Image (cartoon, rainbow, N blue to C red):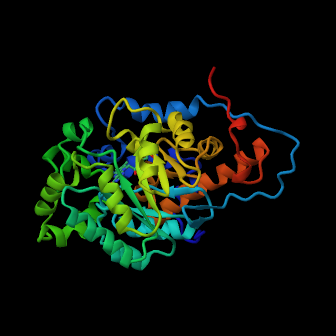
Amino acid sequence: MRRGGRRPQLERAVAISDLRDLAHKRLPRVCFDFVEGGAEDEITVAANRRAFERLPLRPRHLVDVDDRDQSTVVCGTPVKSPVLLAPAGLQRIVSRNAELDAARAAGEAGTVYCVPTSASFPLDEIAAVATGPLWFQLYLWRSREVYEGLVQRAAELNYRALVVTVDTPVSSKRERDMRNGFTVPLRLSLKDRIEALRHPRWIWDYVTGPPITFANLAGVAGSDKIEALADLVNRELTNPAATFADLERLRELWSGPLLVKGTLTAEDARRATACGIDGIVVSNHGGRQLDGAPASIDVLEEVVAAADEHVEVLLDGGVRRGSDVVKAIALGAKAVLIGRPYLWGLAAGDQAGVERVLEILRQEIDVCLTLIGRRSLSELDPSLVRREL
Ligand SMILES: Cc1cc2nc3c(=O)[nH]c(=O)nc-3n(C[C@H](O)[C@H](O)[C@H](O)COP(=O)(O)O)c2cc1C
């Protein structure tokens, strides 16, 4: 872990919530809300947290746990800790080097970075700086040529797994963004510009850094103008006509590990399994799509029970503590992904900020394993979690 020169505020951050506070200070309101917000009343955003908080652990004592290890292998990729970086589009909104720094930080921490289609840097530039394994996230776009081209590119660049997000057949109503007038390209109102003056570092990065754009779609849109790219994303990215037949076609196209992200029911887990997938990410998109969707941790066991044994089940949504990670793995997840926490890390301190987020979680997982009397992730099982009566 790179410590030399790390900013003192990052060293002082002892919990993920401290990184969130730093991000709050660093980002103009429009950008902070873009990350923080969810769909409509944000009921699912809150449910993700509440569900973890309501799950007590059942610690076992007087077990020799002197020698602990939290490494694992997730869909063929070895990781030092079971916390992966979830795909999150347009990270340039919160920091200058965005996906490049996230990739470097994941490599430093020995974990996976799942690069989103809507990254602000091109897939090859991210691959060039990455020091660890990369996965690639894809939406089932309207045009097959678009997604087939992206998949081919990811394969050529050695992205190790493909993650297909299925919970976005339409863009949801994110009311914070609507009220704030958030758009891509970013158009700051006079009021926002005045507010942004309180965040000089962000302004400096915004003005002097690379443009905020969908860098991987320039070839597809036939233009690298942000207006053309944003139009393409709005027109093509969401696809209410996508079906499991598209997933089957992707299976033929992609020979590496294939994961589906967004599954919340046993029925969908069975259908996806039948398409020959290797993994499922139980996810409600961090409460950013269907408001009223269940908390991810509440449906994890249902999905695990329905998926074939060879299908690895991951989870994201509301993971903020090492004990959340331990609970998810005890209930059947192979690993978890985090979204907002590492975006807060990026905003708070670029690569070093993301490293700090991963370090805090790794330390908390270690303490939690010790306190519940388990040496490794393979020793976790559902008896360690008390379900509500
Ligand atoms: C700002 C932001 C952008 C996101 N963009 C994407 C995306 O492009 N593709 C995707 O599959 N999920 C996206 N997600 C969802 C994350 O992958 C993940 O499911 C979610 O953030 C997990 O919840 P958490 O933020 O509570 O950790 C995004 C999330 C955030 C916060």
Residue 252, position as x, y percentages in the image: 36, 66
Residue 183, position as x, y percentages in the image: 18, 50
Nearer-the-camera pick, 365 or 168: 168
The N terminus - image quarter: bottom right
Answer with the quarter of the image where residue 53 lies. Answer: top right
Q: Is residue 365 above or below residue 77?
A: above
Q: Is residue 68 left or right of residue 100?
A: right
- Residue drawn at x 46%, y 31% is 47
- Residue drawn at x 36%, y 43% is 36
- Residue drawn at x 43%, y 70% is 255
The C terminus - image quarter: top right
Taking the image as drawn, is residue 116 in sight? no
Q: Is residue 157 left or right of residue 59?
A: left
- Residue drawn at x 23%, y 56% is 141
Q: Is residue 258 above or below residue 381?
A: below
Residue extending farthest front? 274
Answer with the quarter of the image where residue 134 lies. Answer: bottom left
Q: Is residue 312 above or below residue 106?
A: above
Taking the image as drawn, is residue 54 in sight? yes
Q: Is residue 231 left or right of residue 266?
A: left
Count of numbered circles in the view: 0
Residue extending farthest top? 389
Nearer-the-camera pick, 353 or 9: 353
Residue 146, position as x, y percentages in the image: 21, 65
Residue 243, position as x, y percentages in the image: 29, 48
